[in-house]
Amino acid sequence: MEPGFHSEQAQLPRNMIENSMFEEEPDVVDLAKEPHLHPLEPDEVEYEPRSSRLLVRGLGEHDLEDDEEDYESSARLLGMSFMNRSSNHRNNLTGVYNRETSGGLCSLSSARTVLVGAFVVVIILSIAMVVYFLPKCTFTKEGCHKKNTTLTLIYPLATNGQVFPWPKNRLPNAVVPVHYDLSLHPNLTTMNFIGSVQITVLAKEDTNNITLHSFGLKITKATITPKASSQSKDVQILEYLQHQQIAIKVNPKLLKGETHILNLEYSANLSDGFSGFYKSSYQDKNKTRILAATQFEPASARSAFPCFDEPAFKATFSIKIIREADHISLSNMQKDSTTSIGNGLLQDTFVKSVKMSTYLVAFIVAELKSVSQETASGTLVSVYAVPDKMDQMRYALEAAVKLLKFYEDFFNISYPLKKLDLVAVPDFEAGAMENWGLITFREITLLYREETASILDKQIISVVIAHELAHQWFGNLVTMEWWNDLWLNEGFATFMEFFSLEKVFPELQVADRFLRTRLKAMEKDSMNSSHPLSTSVETAEQIEEIFDSISYEKGASILLMLKDFLGETVFQQGIERYLNEHKYGNTKTEDLWNSITKVKNVDLDVKEMMKTWTLQTGFPVVTVKLDTTANKIHLSQERFLRISISQDPSSSPDSSYLWHIPLTYITSNCSNYSQPKCIKTWLLKNKTGTIHLKEPNVTWVKFNMNMNGYYIVHYEGNTSKELLGLLQNNHLAFSDHDRAGFINNAFVLASAGKLSVRQALSMTKYMKNENSTAPITEALFQLGRIYWLVQKRGSLQLAGRIKKYIFDIFGDLINNQTWSNNGSLSERQLRSTLLDVACGYNHDNCVQIAQELFTEWKQTKNLSVLPSDLTTTIYSVGARDVKGWTFILQMYNSLQLETEKSKMLRAMAKSSNAQQLIWLMYESLQHGTIRTQELPSILATASRSLAGYLFAWDFVKENWDNLVKKFHLGSFPIQAIIVETTSQFSTKSHLFEVQTFFDSLTDKGSQLRAVQEALEIIQLNIQWMDKNLKNLKMWL
Ligand SMILES: [Zn+2]
């Protein structure tokens, strides 16, 4: 999946608080501390708070191995071993008790041990007595209000009051699905659907129950038939809503190795939101048209059909869809036949699918038009959109065909399906979704019209297509076993976005974009609220939350570092081997490292190195000190945290963190960064290290070439001065990404008190000579952030001085920009960034030209009079007065160009008119003329402006319940909304307000990692302002 908005993506969350159902109780044992010994084994990830807490409590909710252990640990911990047990489970428990007794007491021989044992028994008995005499109360999941039976401690009650036979979030493995025959009839008038599913299931052990997922479905009939017979039998269904599970009681029990067919008939409403089987609408010749589409990842297939909705339960699917004649239907596989079934209805039958996970199943019923092209290897690639947008599909088709060929060659594995559809869905929460053979997109990430879109629009569309196509192998063919390793899917697809585009469309110059991606990941990962790449998740909200910047962007960053270290050939061979070894199967992170290690010529234990990056939160800062006398480089590493140690000694980085860092560097003796022979590597595996230089008289060293490593560098002593001097005298001695890295690292180190803000700002002085996009973009980002904070603290005079400083440095460059689409992508990107910043800061010349162009457009209503790269800036200036704003809204409502509409919306959301802002937010929330999917972007834009940031936050507070109804709790849009609408606060009163608001929520909002991230950002802002406001005033 590709997350929502691209140009202004939020910094995403993660915190240390779990979504526990026991939130009212204090922690029993806080194992949430960071790891103490490194490197860790994969199975040691229990230091993550949620799993540790559950292991301690042992209430049978999560990770225990089997039923017996549930009972055992629950009983042990709650002192219930000696209490009455339900007769239904007596045998089971007696077994546990006997085992515990014989193993725990009778076998002990020494008197001391017997005494200790007796003491333990007395304690347990005492606890049991206390619990027993508690007044009609026991510790159920809901609290202390159920009848006191031990049964409810472990097995919950189903909706009908009977005991639900499975207590965990994760499904049992006793019965697994082999094949689904699924038939659906969505009615786009009544907005509901009827379905039936026959699931061929295989018993892996003897069992009386089949437990699977179902949510929001009204099951009207349930039967089971042994595969070997045609004798079907009605069965009872139990439902446990909290885990979105149903259980089918089977009597006599299913025996190991037997295959049965479970037949379920059901109905449900099409969802109002963006997940499950949901409805979407669009305007066509002033008529509202409805379509139905699916979005199942991560856990919403269960809302469309009862299923084993976990990635490891792979099966094949045969899908049939009933539709009206004026619609078409699409699914993962190609259509096999269409038959008329009366009443004007048609039934499409799709070919049986390959073996795949439920979250990749997809179907759409709509009036769509398409363009198609067959690839050289015989796959039919098609792009679909609503009829009015037929003229915007060509580029996507061309890009998809080229990228599909690239991936087939790179992975050396053919795309296994006969067709690949790419569909633009009018209402879509994420950016895109990689359903196998039926990729769905937001319209803006697929549809493109050359004459009116900007070069960046084209880049974004290409990036998203490249991402989703990579998933067809990495994710679809080989899938993570569980969501804790989501990064395997998303980190890899994000890495491949850039890797494939550099090869297939070099003119799109995605390298700068990838650099910003890495820097963004590090920004989030430098906070306490971050999390390890492989991280423990259980509940639906926890799974939603892991779709964040760490899984995507950090994942991609560490793969780039690994590829650079191994070399492209070995990396490719490792990936090919991994895909071949695990195709149609499921994997854990270590499987990837094992496959790469097995490639010939790899004399490195890849797993040993990479687990330091996947199991630990954060990244290292490497301190470099050159000893010119002894000709040595002294190195040391520690975790980098964006917090001032001097102000908060308790938060000093945990010294047990240790990474295996594949360092790259050049020295003054061989300093040509474009010469591979000059770039040296060194693996730092310990806390400190020393490189003995072979070449004499080295005066400076530069580490982390092109910022391709996921670490920052702090130079001590003369090296720092030498590098700064060189940067100022001959900045081209370093690559553009190295220059961007210098700027970034300086500001980041300043945020942790390792450099002064004055030193960081000094670094930008050389930039009067700078022409390259990456360092300029980075400097404008860092300076802009300071400007926004200062401005919102009311220090308008100081903000004015920051603005003046920016114009002093970049004024000439701004004035030299033409208002055109000329040049390479990088030059065009630089132009649009510079002019947007200039007009945003009210640069006279910029505003005047933008205003003139806006007036011309208003008079002609012809978009082609505007340079398409600069329309964002022109709309933003035009929207500053009421007439301009109203004109943009009119155009927004009449245009069919999503790329332009999105820019118009952002321009409108920059307004300083309260009435306009509030209207925009509510119109979008209510899905009026502005789609609800745009709301996170509107709020993010408004939050950055002085006029809008308080309104945006008020809006979130007032509409929280509605927001979490529209977007899932924990989902990417919710994460973005929380972080974006609070990240401009830098006062204690705002911190208190945000904290109080989230604490007051009755849903699980306060426990979201995004909330912890938001609070941490505000604290960091407060700290930064306290420390630096005075320095800034003196320096500027
Ligand atoms: Zn993805």
Image: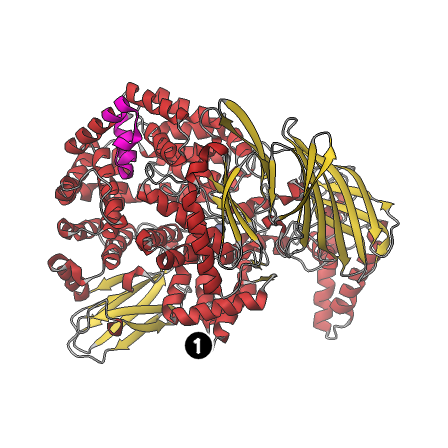
Query: Residue 756: horizontal and vertical position, in percent?
Result: 22, 52
Q: Residues within 10 Å of mark 1 (few under 14, many from 20)?
A: some
Residue 858 is a magenta residue: yes
- Give the dominant element type of the magenta stretch: helix, strand or loop: helix
Colour scheme employed for the rendering of this structure: secondary structure
Where is 53 relative to 450, above or below? below
Could you tell me which quadrant the C terminus lies in? top left
* In the image, residue 998 above or below residue 731: above
In this picture, which residue range is highlighted in magenta?
856-878
Residue nearest the viewer, comparing 399 with 189: 399
Left or right of residue 288: residue 516: left
Q: Is residue 380 above or below residue 655?
A: above
* Residue 733 within the segment the image draws in magenta: no
Position in image of residue 1023 (x %, y %): 31, 44
Give the quadrant of residue 708.
bottom left
For mark 1, what is the residue?
602
Front residue of 937 and 988: 937
- Residue at point 31%, 72% (across, down): 681
Q: Nearer the viewer, residue 510 or 482?
A: 510
**Three-letter residue code for mark 1:** Val
Secondary element at tag 1: loop
From the viewer's side, name the closer residue of 595 and 283: 283
Tell me, yes or no, if residue 332 can be seen here. Answer: yes
Residue 11, percent across and down? 39, 45
- Residue at 53% x, 45% y is 544
The total number of labels drawn is 1
Q: Is residue 247 left or right of residue 797?
A: right
Residue 530 visible here:
no
The image quarter containing residue 806 is top left
Q: Position of residue 945 (x, y in %)?
A: 31, 32
